[in-house]
Image (spheres, coloured by chain):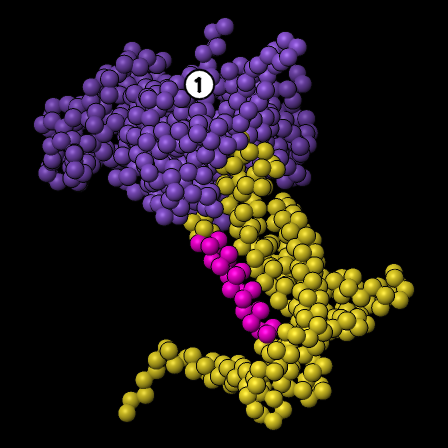
Chain colours: A yellow, B purple
Amino acid sequence: MKLRFNRSQLCIPYALFLILFVIAPLLVIIYYAFSNGQGKFTFDNFIGFFSSTNTLGTLLYSFALAIVTTLLCLFIAYPTAYFLARSGFKKQYVLLMLFILPMWINFTLRITALKEVLTLLEGNISLHPFLNSVIGMTYDFLPFMILPLYTSFLKLDKNLLEAAADLGANKFIVFLRVTLPLSIPGIISGITMVLLPSMTNYVVLDMLYNSTYIMGSLIGSYFSAYDWNNGSMISLVLLVIIFIVTLVTNRFGDKDSDARRTVL
Amino acid sequence: MENSENIIELIDVTKVFDGETIAVDKFNLQVKKGEFVTFLGPSGCGKTTTLRMIAGFEIPTSGQILLNGEDISKLPPNKRPVNTVFQKYALFPHLNVYENIAFGLKLKKTEVSYVDKKGNAKVKYKKLAKSEIDKKVKRTLELVDLEGFEKRSVSTLSGGQQQRIAIARAIVNEPEILLLDEPLGALDLKMRKEMQIELKNMHKRLGITFIYVTHDQEEALTMSDKIVVINDGEIQQTGTPTEIYNEPINTFVADFIGDSNIFNGTVVGKRKVKFCGAEFDCVDDFEVNEMVDVVVRPEDIKLCAPGEGQLKGEVQSCVFKGVHYEITVVLGRFEIVIQSTMSAIVGNLTGMKIEPDGIHLMQKVYTVNKYSGVITKTNTVQFGDGEFDCDVTSLYPSSHLDEEGYLITAQGEKLDLTGTEVDVEVETADITMSDDKEAGGVVGNIISIIYKGDHYRYIVRTEENEEDYVLSCPDMWNTGDRVSLIIPKEKIKLSLKVAEDKK
């Protein structure tokens, strides 16, 4: 028999990986989420999640934290990326590096350093848990917001800005009617990159002595107490939420990437 | 005032980029209301920069742009009653066809004068009503033949349709001047021809002044009332298409517009010129014995029986070009291109006849290279962008050099020439090019080639100071070739600068 190489065979390793490390664990999570300690099928965990003020409160808190962090990131990153991309400065890449460079430093090291700075400023940092968590995560996720925005500003066709000015738009209207709508794909991918991780990243909170739980820490605490079933249910709910958020943002992204194609 | 009918006037407009690159040099132009003016020139000649200055995207380094007599040189683009059709359309991808066209209208404010309660006349600015915008967009879409396209996304349109939307977006604002920056460059040939005619019709119907930029000479000849031929940031010639084609002012224009045979000629009598070894009657009056460039259009040369006509040569090739044949005839070292509706047999001898009005004489622009130079320590001369060996003793009659390199004049005076400023002249035929970068005194790139019948005229430009060297050479080189220039010592003519001469 002749051994024939097919291009589609290239995906076999990936498929194996996918089955072993994504699909199988997912099935395990679903199994645990809908069973009790004795392995019997039950909806108790599901009902428990939505009837406990503790979990729902944590969910809301996580959402609030993630949304505030994302908005703050967007607020800082948008003008930064705009001026980085627009500046006539020839070495703009060096400027960009200044914002990206912190990513090269170990994450725990960075947060520890931030902790010291915050302690210096605030004294007892556990008094402002929400504020500190937002600062910590913003610091951590800012590059993920700057990069996609920077790229979308770079790709912006200068002729469009000139065309708008030519048609009577002043600088502000040019920004409002052309620059802003055309940077939406960048905003969307920036939000996706920041919102989702900041909902579950509890390491920053832990390190900044934030005693409040977010979804990630809740799962962690259930699992470390060997309560697989409730932990799995929370993971599953979170997964569904993330799935919905991704679906919604992709819908936006698709529409705009369609429009983008015509620019090129 | 006489020039009140000029809608736009450019006075000594100059644009320098980064403080060194001169893109547009002392540009002077007047455009009358309703004219169709074309800026024609090779890429990088400054035509687009000039257009962008009129649009307001670039601010002139010096000079003035007057619109109806008012200086608008420093106004931002949104304050000018001028609209642009961009080369790559620049339609807004996030807006549909209607929104694209209405973009300018939605920003427009009209003056409404009214009388307030106290009886004072006042002026209010009002935005256009939605119904009015709708009406204008609809009418403009009809004008560009795209009725019913309002709701379409611009990405679903073909290149030609996008082009029409871009034009519609500009003319819907009823600008005083419409600027078009190579608007048909991205279309295929057939589409381009159609759009040329449509644009011309649109110009007639709208009565708006059009300023059109192109590098396509045929497009310029077809569409314009007035052509401005530009090269190296300077206007070469301004005139109607007929004037430009029939009476090119220099060899650049002749070479750029249409095909032409360019020869070196000498004026031998009143309205008589000699080139290609024969004498011709002509219509241009030049001084006797003046060296001139002779331009003859290929269609102005008639084939006839050998012996008849002024010239005789052998047919080297005959290529069918659709409407005519392109025939190349060799006559000694000259090569003559002829367009004729009749074919010729390769290898046959043929006579050629040129009527006096088919011969265009023009002043020779480059017969000699002139530079200011400085004598160096080692008795070489520095000029242009290089250093060449020269004979410094030619500066003073019957002088010689002593062994230390000082010049001893006929009177026995000892002179140190280092730093002496001189005028340098080199004939175009005395410069030769070489591939060997070390062989000559200076290295540069060929920026222009014009075929002159039996030789090529090259312009070589150096990189450092952008000095030009003009030379003629029978061999074929390519534009962009990097060459070093060799000038024999005895061919460099030196003379002391008059101001430097104390006595």
The local secondary structure at tag 1 comes to strand
Q: Residue at x 86, y 65 (%)?
A: A127
Q: Which residue is mark 1?
A: B31
Q: Residue at x 37, y 78 (%)?
A: A8
Q: In the picture shown, does residue B362 fall above or below A133?
A: above
Q: Residue at x 77, y 64 (%)?
A: A130
Residue B199 percent across, percent down from the top left: 33, 29
Question: For this rendering, which residue is in front, A190 or A221?
Answer: A221
Q: In the picture shown, does residue A226 fall above or below A201?
A: below
Q: Is B226 situated left or right of B377 in this image?
A: left
Q: Which residues are magenta?
A: A237-258
Q: Is B26 situated left or right of B337 in this image?
A: right
Residue A148 magenta = no
The disc labelled 1 sits on which kind of residue? Answer: Val
Question: For this rendering, which residue is in front, B90 or B271?
Answer: B90
Q: Quadrant of residue B475?
A: top left
Q: Label 1: few (<14), some or many (≥20) within 10 Å?
A: many
Give the position of the C terminus of chain B as an image quadrant: top right
Q: Residue at x 48, y 84 (%)?
A: A19
Residue B153 percent across, percent down from the top left: 40, 46
Residue B195 percent across, percent down from the top left: 30, 34
Q: In the picture shown, does residue B7 fall above or below B48?
A: above
Question: For this rendering, which residue is in front, A19 or B240?
Answer: A19
Q: Quadrant of residue B317?
A: top left
Q: Is residue B273 visible?
A: yes
Residue A247 magenta = yes
Q: In the picture shown, does residue B133 fall above or below A157?
A: above
Residue B154 percent across, percent down from the top left: 40, 45
List the single residue furthest toward the right. Answer: A123
